[in-house]
Amino acid sequence: MDIPIAGYATGVAVANDLVSTSPTVRGAAGDALPRPAALAGLLAGHGLVLDAPPPDDAALHEVHLLRRETRGVIETETEEQAVAGAMVLAGRAGRSPVLRRDDAGAWQWHVPTAPGAPLAAELAAVIGIGLLGAVRTLGHSRFRPCAAPGCRGVFVDVSRAGRRAYCMPDRCGNRVNVAGHRARLRSAN
């Protein structure tokens, strides 16, 4: 796999979605990655074509461990801690960066992954490069906990305005909006 450094948003999106699959975040809904097919769906949803073989039970277990590690990097208190954690992830399967021309002829940095690297290592490299790009471009202040009451989710905000508040806007944001709407209806009566 060849990971473009300029495309850090993909790695961040994968990190955010991976962390949000955890039973810690999903509560009673349980693990959103219970089987290798669910992991394959997550990868396909991000358009990731890894060099590793399709997910099996062993790869899924490794990705569950990576999920915890990714959450730990997002929860760091300082930029230095976030960079150190992301460097560990990027180094899992990443090799030395290379400079190559893109289709338009412009020079772009890429991080290739090692041949034969396991799925979790390649995924760690994608996430690590994404998190490093987010720290460099947006700053550590974009690594946040979810603002929804009772939610234990964390995420990296790569939105243009930098005002994202929820780990899963369609779930947590909607739940907060519905609760606010109901509270307004009650107070109006």
Image (tube, rainbow, N blue to C red):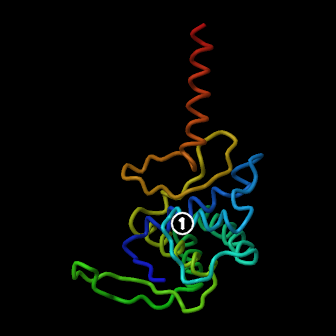
Horizontally, residue 23 falls left or right of residue 3, namely: right
Q: Nearer the viewer, residue 134 or 63?
A: 63
Which residue occupies the extreme top position in the image?
A: 189
- Give the image location of residue 84, x and y in percent: 56, 77
User: Callout 1: helix, strand or loop?
Assistant: helix
Report crowding for label 1: few under 14, some 14 to 19, many 20 or more residues within 10 A (C-alpha).
Answer: few
What residue do we see at 42% from left, 51% from top? Answer: 162
What residue do we see at 58% from left, 59% from top? Answer: 17
- Give the image location of residue 18, x and y in percent: 61, 62
Q: Nearer the viewer, residue 180 or 4?
A: 4
- Give the image location of residue 73, x and y in percent: 60, 68
Quadrant in which the C terminus appears: top right
Answer with the quarter of the image where residue 63 lies. bottom right
What residue do we see at 50% from left, 90% from top? Answer: 95
Horizontally, residue 57 falls left or right of residue 137, namely: right
Amino acid type, mark 1: Ala
When the figure is inspected, residue 85 is found, relative to residue 141, above or below; the finding is: below
When the figure is inspected, residue 154 is found, relative to residue 108, above or below; the finding is: above
- Give the image location of residue 91, x and y in percent: 56, 85
Label count reads 1
What residue do we see at 64% from left, 64% from top? Answer: 71
Residue ID for mark 1: 44
When the figure is inspected, residue 44 is found, relative to residue 126, above or below; the finding is: above
